[in-house]
Image (cartoon, rainbow, N blue to C red):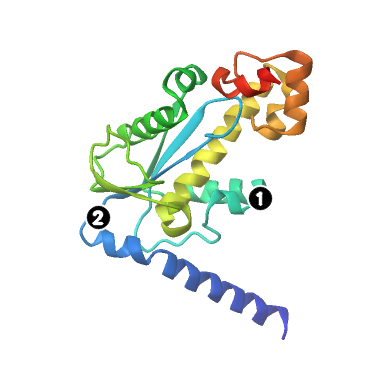
Amino acid sequence: MNQLIKNFLKEEKERKRLYDFHKQERELKDDYPILVGVDEAGRGPLAGPVYAACVCLPTGIFINGLNDSKKMSEEKRNLIATEIKEQALFYTYGYSSVKEIDNLNILNATMLAMSRAMAKCPVVPDYCLVDGNLLPEAMNCNGKAVVKGDLLMPSIAAASILAKTKRDEIMTFIHKTVPEYAFDKHKGYGTKAHYEALEAYGQSLFHRETFLKRFKQK
């Protein structure tokens, strides 16, 4: 089988995957034309904000490779993020700061970041799909929570990718202020190198106090 045929079959397989992937959203859009997906990035790290993105994708537009952000390399994620921004009807971001995470707890701070992203929509959505099992209290539209939504709903998958790439961008920027922690590498997650930096330098103002309690008890 020559390479041309292999490429064609690969493209057809991806096209079918995307068509099936969009099925539930296509049906929802019959009743809710302005449908958005919302997801977050950064619930688990020891440092940095938690980010959320809200994305409205047009009907009939398939973005090759669109999937859960955790299932792709950083390079691929950045490429797909660029295409999402080009194709989306609109997209917005919201975040909660380290201080808000410590004061509110990570769950409430995440819900706040999602609410802030939704509040920035240029129009009020008809329906909102939120990754997880909870909906933000401050939602301004109908919607539902979708467990593992980034694997089931294209709009949530797109929001997952934009939230992740935006937060990575912010952590890379923060790295310039405190390069000793190498935030550009691990983005604030609890890697061996990050814990070693905490041992050597202590915590920075970008670290989450409530996430470091166990570390301090060692």
Return the residue nearer the eye: 60 or 109. Answer: 109
Residue found at x 45% / y 28%? 95
Q: Which residue is farthest left?
A: 31
**Rendered location of residue 110, percent (x, y):** 43, 32
Label 1 with label 2: CB-CB less than 8 Å: no
Name which quarter of the figure residue 39 lies in: top left
Res. 122 in view: yes
Return the residue nearer the eye: 55 or 41. Answer: 41
Return the residue nearer the eye: 35 or 211. Answer: 211
Q: Which residue is mark 1?
A: 73
Provide the secondary structure element on which disc 2 rests.
Answer: loop
Q: Please say if 84 is above or below 103.
A: below
Is residue 112 rendered to the left or right of residue 190? left
Amino acid type of disc 1? Ser
Q: Nearer the viewer, mark 1 or mark 2?
A: 1
Name which quarter of the figure residue 196 lies in: top right
Sequence-first disc among 1 and 2: 2
Q: Work out which quarter of the rendered image holds the N terminus and state it.
A: bottom right
Amino acid type of disc 2? Pro
Q: Please say if 9 is above or below 49.
A: below
**Rendered location of residue 20, percent (x, y):** 43, 70
Tell me how far mark 1 sits from mark 2, CA to CA: 32 Å
Q: Badge 2, how many Cα within 10 Å: few under 14, some, many 20+?
A: some
Provide the secondary structure element on which disc 1 rests.
Answer: loop
Res. 180 in view: no
Q: Please say if 133 is above or below 184.
A: below
Q: Which residue is mark 2?
A: 33
**Rendered location of residue 115, percent (x, y):** 34, 32
Q: Please say if 164 is above or below 176.
A: below
Q: Work out which quarter of the rendered image holds the C terminus and state it.
A: top right
